[in-house]
Image (cartoon, grey):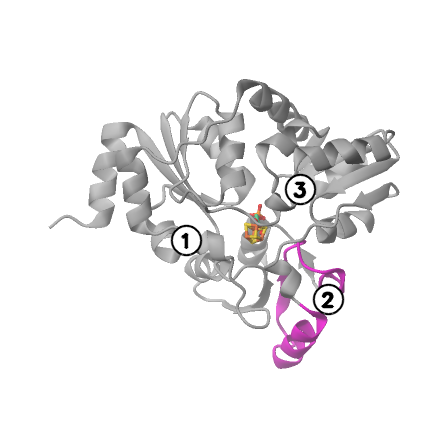
């Protein structure tokens, strides 16, 4: 009997497809993926790839970003309702209203936003380049959306006035200072790596504040043997796999992103076999949203 990996390999070949998976996906999904990475890395891989079908094991805004950067490819999201609750906290109408309130400000959207929101802002950013993007702007005031915690992190590293939107990631926003202090006491020699979607009191305790791929890179380069990881706990799988000689501990109780865990191997097989659920975005939104993403890439 053929293994799932073999069955998927044949299907991928027949359909000229690849499977890409975010760093938070289930281990079995990461294992069959052609590439595993952070949201922007994966969209860039989707763009560069010669495949005509991309199965994106992640959440909707990530698959949409891939579609915006590769409009000619068929981008499939295996689970229709795998969304990002933070991305859903702001709409393009909310941005339009804010523009009336702050006519002189630049509008910066984190990639964790839907395509329509990307189409009405000036520029996008990721968790790894947010400070650089904000500092590159000519405006003195910046409306930063939707994540208030990332906005606060940026405000500590710029002279610009940051106007944060009141959004947050329900996974990272649950970290608290006491979890860090307890773990510091337990593992005083550990390096603390935290994602910038976490609250300010938690980021203050970090040795490094990094995106998911930034955490992977730092863990590989560091001389330290132990690490406290402040992000969605799915990242620990890849950290352990790539650094078997080092120890990784989730900050506090493990924190899971429910929507990131919805995608199973069966969903991936069904997605590719039935070519569902395809991402459709209108041409005008693709064009405006691509401008915001390309402005970011050019900086
Ligand atoms: P990264 O881009 O750092 O992988 O983060 C995506 C995300 O959704 C974090 O919660
Ligand atoms: Fe969205 Fe948070 Fe899940 Fe990332 S971890 S996809 S920001 S809900």
In three-dimensional space, the C-alpha distance between marks 1 and 2, rounded to whole angstroms, equals 32 Å
Q: Write down the quadrant of residue 288 in the picture.
A: top right
Mark 3 surroundings: few (<14), some (14-19) or many (≥20) residues within 10 A = some
Residue drawn where x is 69% and y is 28% of the image: 120
- Which residue reaches farthest bottom? 186
Residues shaded magenta: 176-205
Q: Position of residue 178 (x, y in %)?
A: 70, 75
Compute the Cα span from label 2 to label 3.
29 Å
From the viewer's side, name the closer residue of 281 and 21. 281
Q: Earlier in the sequence, mark 2 or mark 3?
A: 3
Q: Examine the rendering and report whether any part of residue 44 can be seen.
A: no
Q: Judge the density around disc 2: few (<14), some (14-19), many (≥20) Cα neighbours within 10 Å.
A: some
Residue 178 part of the magenta segment: yes
- Give the residue pinned by disc 3: 90
Which numbered dot is residue 262? 1
Of discs 1 and 2, which sits in the foreground?
A: 1
Proximity of marks 1 and 2: CB atoms separated by less than 8 Å: no
Alpha-carbon span between mark 1 and mark 3: 23 Å
Q: Which residue is mark 2?
A: 205
């Amino acid at each position: 009997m053929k293994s799932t990996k073999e069955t998927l390999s044949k299907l991928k070949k027949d359909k000229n497809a690849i499977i890409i998976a975010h760093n938070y996906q289930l281990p079995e999904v990461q294992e069959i993926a052609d590439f595993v990475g952070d949201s922007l890395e994966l969209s860039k891989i989707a763009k560069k790839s010669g495949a005509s079908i991309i199965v994106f094991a992640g959440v909707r805004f990530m698959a949409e970003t891939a579609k915006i950067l590769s409009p000619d490819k068929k981008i499939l999201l295996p689970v229709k309702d795998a969304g990002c609750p933070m991305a859903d906290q702001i709409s393009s109408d909310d941005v339009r209203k804010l523009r009336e309130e702050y006519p002189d400000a630049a509008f910066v959207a984190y990639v964790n936003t839907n395509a329509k929101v990307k189409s009405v802002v000036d520029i996008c950013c990721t968790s790894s380049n947010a400070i650089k993007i904000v500092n590159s702007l000519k405006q003195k005031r910046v409306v930063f959306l939707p994540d208030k915690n990332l906005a606060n992190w940026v405000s500590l590293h710029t002279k610009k006035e940051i106007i944060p939107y009141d959004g947050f990631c329900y996974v990272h926003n649950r970290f608290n200072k006491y979890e860090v202090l307890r773990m510091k006491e337990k593992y005083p020699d550990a390096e603390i790596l935290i994602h910038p979607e976490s609250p300010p009191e938690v980021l203050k305790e970090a040795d490094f504040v990094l995106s998911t791929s930034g955490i992977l890179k730092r863990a590989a380069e560091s001389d330290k043997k132990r690490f406290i990881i402040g992000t969605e706990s799915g990242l620990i799988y890849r950290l352990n796999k790539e650094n078997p000689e080092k120890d990784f501990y989730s900050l506090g109780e493990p924190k899971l992103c429910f929507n990131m865990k919805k995608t199973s191997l069966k969903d991936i097989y069904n997605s590719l076999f039935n070519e569902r659920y395809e991402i459709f975005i209108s041409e005008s939104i693709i064009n405006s949203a691509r401008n915001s993403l390309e402005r970011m890439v050019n900086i």
